[in-house]
Image (cartoon, rainbow, N blue to C red):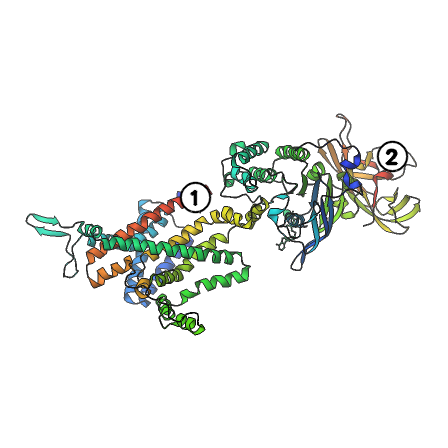
Amino acid sequence: MSAGALDRAGAGRFALPLPLKITFGLLVLLAAAGAVLLPQNAALLLGGLVAAVLVAFGLGRAAGISDRWLVIAIPMLWLFVFFLVPFLVLGRISLSEAMIARPPYSPLFEQGADGWEYAGSFGNYQFLAEDPLYASAYISSIRIAATSTLLALLIGYPLAYFIARSPEPRRSILLLLVILPFWTSFLLRVYAWIGLLRRDGVINGFLMWTGIIDQPLVMLQTDFAVYLGIVYTYLPFMILPLYANLVKLDGALLEAASDLGASPILTFFTVTLPLSLPGIIAGSMLVFIPAIGEFVIPALLGGPDTLMIGRVLWDEFFSARDWPVASAVAIVMLFLVVVPIMWLQSVQNRQEGAQ
Amino acid sequence: MSSQAQPAVAADLRPWTDPDATPFISVKGVSKRFGTFTAVSDVSLDIYRGEVFCLLGGSGCGKTTLLRMLAGFESPTEGKILIDGKDMANVPADRRPTNMMFQSYALFPHMSVEKNVAYGLLREGKSKPEAMDRVAQMLKLVKLEPYAKRKPHQLSGGQRQRVALARALVKQPKVLLLDEPLGALDKKLREETQFELIRIQETLGVTFIVVTHDQEEAMTLATRIGVMTEGEIRQIGEPREIYESPNSRFVADFIGSVNLFEGTVASLNGAQAVVDTADLGPVTTTAPEGVSVGQTVTLAIRPERFALTRAAPAEGTPNTCRAMVRDMGYGGHISSYRLKLGNGRIVSATQSNRLRDEDPIMWDEEISITFPPPVVRVLTR
Ligand SMILES: Nc1ncnc2c1ncn2[C@@H]1O[C@H](COP(=O)(O)OP(=O)(O)OP(=O)(O)O)[C@@H](O)[C@H]1O
Ligand SMILES: [Mg+2]
């Protein structure tokens, strides 16, 4: 939808037409019914949300705010409650010091000689900067995530291309196969890899049986296993956006390129690849971002020297019970991830604007 | 490239009249089936160097499919295609001496106008400055210089069409395949571009195959026209031949407007025949070969060939009858009439408005229409 259309939709002040009023009435009824039937906590949450929406619309109407803003306001509210608030809580904890108490960190304001004093500090961040363990954990996380993303791209691109070029009934089946692994628990699938990669696992067993090797390969608890796990787990996130992009590619463009004398390989590099850049960026972000903070895969498949920030975070929180340092670790990671995302987003926006 | 020498004999200008001339493109018994659907059926065509060959036909008759087989995007189910004496069966699109302008334009959306046009030149190994020079010339020709840096989505439909045209022309291929090249242009620009195409064709000696469903365009551009329907080519001929001597009811009806009358051959006297019709009575005409007495035939008369007069023609004039003017439309250079014959049949006729203050024939007048034997065409199919 274009911004123009949104503008036009928003030009009218908030005034509900009759069918919408009926819809709202039904929603309220539904929420009430849900509140009766659902367990108490869920009911509270749902009721609260519906109430918040209604209050927002009511207030908006009273204040004469156009419905366009209200439509935007609801997801904003969601982001505020479930993203910004936890972020602020983390930020606040990261400024404290660890204490053996409940909660296990010092308060931000202390009763001093002359009233309340601010007791927060950036000491935890300084600590992160000084201890080389953290820097190398960040770098190693980025390296592992970037390498995995690249591998996923190299594997996912041909697959996505193949699926997008397949005739219709087969295409749906192939897509289904891509998302099929999601039907089993992620944890189970990672455990399954342990069974495959173990010293006495399926792969070693098979290779020894065929006589290709006579000593079992060490695969589990290596970086290789971590890459394998990450690429395996996140490959669908690479394939799906690439597929969505490639399936839209106009076959006539490829014909035009070959008509003008470009070989299939040149056609790929001059037409297909540049046109699929938005898909590449989207897929890479969907793999890179979760991979960088990945905890389960390095914990289960990685060795003792596989250093990833997710594990460090876990150790700080649960082993060392140092919530402030853990919070600082999390916040630094957030910035490390968010900054490149914002940059990529702006690049992509500029590209889309040009197309 | 040097311009061609003045042809010595007419056969040089019209090589298809010379049985010994070698065609540049030969399509031999080509069919294309998609599943059980036959898009092109048993087409045979010879096209000569330097021709502008127009494929004319209604929507969905297989014009684009035929062109795509020539360009190499589709392989024939049956038959073969020769270009410059070489069988194209195993030659991929990127190695054929053809360039195509796509009906959908197929411009690269991520490249500027300039880069789109330069694409083909760079692929054949031209240096960048050289390519850009040529591109600039080409853009000038299609009047797109100010838009060189724009992306295709920033252009109007007609401008995009011209980019597509420039991109196909810039490589000066031996064969240029144009799929509806001028459809989106306004009348003035279309006429200019038609002349430009002819000029390019004459200076470069490129062989054009142009798909169109605009008859007027085919008539002005073409050296020869192939009329297609339902995947078949029904008639191939020079524009004049197609218009004046259509070989079937379909072609007569498809090209221009025509009045068709059913009749049976009543008598034959050498080449002269009398055909009995319900609408016009006995019609004297020249019969084509192979017509026999008693055969059912169709008579075709173009609207402009009727002579309309208030007074009845002299006694003994063949092929004349009375009619009522039901409708009259003034069209500037011509006036068109709908005339009602004695048996209620409506025919259309046009008269050119040669004199300014002539007293024109008007509504509800009873007039005589005359159609001398040479203007009546006998169709047996
Ligand atoms: N890939 C395909 N699969 C199945 N049928 C096809 C395919 N391509 C074309 N056809 C069919 O073949 C017939 C001829 O198509 P074609 O595109 O050649 O028509 P056309 O003469 O160019 O029409 P238009 O003037 O509308 O462009 C149409 O009925 C079309 O539906
Ligand atoms: Mg077509």
The disc labelled 2 sits on which kind of residue?
Answer: Ala
Q: Secondary structure at mark 1?
A: helix
- Is the C-beta of the residue carrying label 1 under 8 Å from the nearest atom of ligand 1? no
Q: Is residue B78 visible?
A: yes
Real-space Cα separation, disc 1 to disc 2, in angstroms? 76 Å
Looking at the image, residue A283 lies above or below residue B9: below
Number of numbered tags placed on the structure image:
2
Q: Residue at x 28, y 66 (%)?
A: A40
Looking at the image, residue A300 lies above or below residue B95: below
**Quarter of the image holding residue B46?**
top right
Looking at the image, residue B60 lies above or below residue A34: above
Residue most toward the top?
A: B357
Q: Is residue B230 visible?
A: no
Q: Secondary structure at mark 2?
A: loop
Residue B303 coordinates in the image, percent (x, y): 78, 39
Viewer-proximal residue, B33 or B57?
B33
Residue pointed to by mark 2 = B312
| Residue B229 placement, left or right of A312 | right
Residue most toward the bottom?
A: A209
Q: Residue at x 53, y 37 (%)?
A: B127
Residue A2 coordinates in the image, percent (x, y): 44, 45
Q: What is the chain letter for disc 1?
A: A
Residue most toward the right?
A: B269
Q: Residues within 10 Å of mark 2 (few under 14, many from 20)?
A: some
Residue A312 coordinates in the image, percent (x, y): 25, 59
Q: What is the chain letter for disc 2?
A: B
| Residue B289 placement, left or right of A99 | right
The disc labelled 1 sits on which kind of residue?
Answer: Gln
Foreground tag (1 vs 2)? 1
Residue pointed to by mark 1 = A351
Residue A53 coordinates in the image, percent (x, y): 32, 54
